[in-house]
């Protein structure tokens, strides 16, 4: 049995060995002023392109995880997205295919006991109610359908996402931000493999969870998305897909955590007008974005935007946050406390974003997407 301190040394040796064996392409930092980031997600779209095109940002890699899509499909999207951006120098590292404990069968059982979920991601077969949003094709975890952007020609790194993130934070201690916009399975695995992982990162910024979101826009799509939190305001898909991983991650000793819940996204929409405005430039990314008027809220884009420019945050609050991991009607729901009310069993204080400056955020997105 390896003691905790011995395990940390063991993990560092594994990380060093992985680097010496060429587990992935070595990363060389840019100028000292550059901000370093790893982006972990269950897909690839506007938010990732924003961070890629931002000045003074060094993207060390993109991790992939199952959630809205299976991990292999998310990996294909990430590879193709980097090809479109002309940034195949940035590695794509494959992460977890399945949640730590949750599963499709357990979710079916939960629904039989407590009612239907609005969205189930890769496990979604049909909408409960008539919905204008297209439903991704249901398929097994090892199947990757043809992508609407075209299929990638490049391949992912041979390294897995958890070990990649561990290696990077050891290589650049205190310098790397991690943006998480999917389920937290890779982060939880990294923390369990190396107890120093979270403490060596600069910060965690994640999109996930909800407190008390309310419909703000009057469009049909906005009303349909409001179904997810109308009767269950504390339930959100990224957390609900792998609640155990989210709880492990939230208890880890990060220097700083920024939570971007659903709440601020209800003032935003990927409408045809918005897409037409931000994708007016004739660039490869803009040409793809022009096809992206899906009327989704700008969930991940808010997380990317407030990391790039924290002054976009109009209001926020400090809360201690955890996740209900009991297999009950509230499985996967967010738990939160103000100072002094938390159970004090390892919960971490998080800066929770409540509202953002939407016009300025849209201007930032347009500026980044229009760059050649």
Image (cartoon, grey):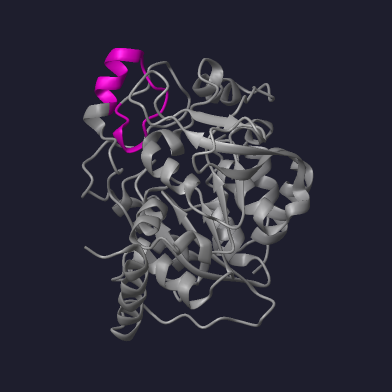
Question: Is residue 285 or residue 179 the one in the foreground?
Answer: 179
* Stretch in magenta: 107-125
In the image, what residue occupies the spot 21% across and 63% down?
A: 1
Image coordinates of residue 49 in percent, x first then y, are 56, 59
In the image, what residue occupies the spot 78% across and 48% down?
A: 360
Residue 228 appears left or right of 307: left
Q: Is residue 158 visible?
A: yes
In the image, what residue occupies the spot 30% across and 75% down?
A: 14
Image coordinates of residue 248 in percent, x first then y, are 42, 45
Image coordinates of residue 134 in percent, x first then y, are 42, 32
Vertical relation: 65 (above or below) 7:
above
Vertical relation: 7 (above or below) 22:
above
Residue 46 appears left or right of 267: left
Question: Is residue 285 or residue 107 the one in the foreground?
Answer: 107
Q: Is residue 90 visible?
A: no
Residue 273 colored in magenta in the image: no
Vertical relation: 70 (above or below) 50:
above
In the image, what residue occupies the spot 35% across and 14% down?
A: 114
Image coordinates of residue 353 in percent, x first then y, are 68, 40
Q: Residue 194 appears in which quarter of the rendering?
A: bottom left
Question: Is residue 257 or residue 354 the one in the foreground?
Answer: 257
Residue 119 colored in magenta in the image: yes
In the rendered image, the quadrant that contains the C terminus is bottom right
Q: Residue 245 appears in which quarter of the rendering?
A: top left
Vertical relation: 52 (above or below) 12:
above
Question: Is residue 188 or residue 47 the one in the foreground?
Answer: 188
């Amino acid at each position: 049995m390896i003691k905790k301190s011995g395990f940390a040394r063991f993990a560092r040796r594994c990380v060093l060995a992985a680097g010496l064996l060429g587990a992935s392409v070595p990363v060389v930092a840019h100028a000292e002023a550059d901000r370093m980031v790893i982006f972990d997600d269950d897909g690839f779209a506007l938010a990732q392109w924003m961070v890629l095109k931002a000045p003074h940002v060094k993207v060390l890699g993109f991790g992939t995880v199952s959630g809205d899509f299976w991990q292999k499909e998310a990996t294909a999207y990430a590879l193709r997205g980097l090809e479109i951006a002309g940034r195949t120098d940035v590695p794509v590292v494959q992460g977890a295919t399945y949640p730590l404990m949750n599963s499709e069968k357990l979710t079916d059982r939960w629904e039989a006991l407590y009612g239907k979920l609005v969205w189930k991601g890769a496990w979604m077969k049909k909408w409960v109610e008539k919905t204008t949003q297209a439903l991704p094709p249901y398929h097994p975890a090892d199947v990757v359908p043809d992508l609407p952007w075209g299929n990638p020609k490049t391949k992912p790194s041979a390294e897995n996402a958890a070990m990649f993130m561990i290696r990077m934070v050891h290589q650049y201690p205190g310098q790397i931000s991690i943006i998480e916009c999917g389920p937290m399975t890779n982060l939880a695995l990294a923390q369990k493999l190396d107890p120093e992982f979270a403490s060596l990162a600069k910060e965690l910024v994640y999109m996930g969870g909800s407190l008390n979101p309310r419909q703000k826009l009057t469009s049909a799509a906005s009303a349909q998305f409001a179904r997810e939190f109308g009767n269950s305001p504390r339930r959100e898909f990224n957390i609900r897909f792998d609640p155990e991983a989210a709880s492990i991650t939230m208890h880890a000793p990060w220097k700083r955590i920024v939570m971007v819940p659903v709440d601020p996204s209800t003032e935003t929409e990927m409408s045809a007008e918005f897409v037409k405005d931000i994708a007016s430039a004739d660039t490869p990314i803009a040409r793809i974005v022009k096809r992206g008027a899906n009327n989704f809220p700008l969930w991940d884009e808010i997380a990317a935007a407030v990391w790039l420019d924290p002054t976009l945050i109009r209001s926020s609050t400090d809360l201690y946050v955890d996740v209900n991991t009991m297999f009950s009607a509230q499985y996967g729901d967010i738990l939160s406390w103000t100072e002094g009310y938390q159970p004090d069993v390892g919960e971490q204080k998080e800066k929770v974003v409540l509202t953002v400056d939407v016009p300025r955020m849209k201007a930032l997105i347009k500026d980044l997407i229009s760059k050649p």
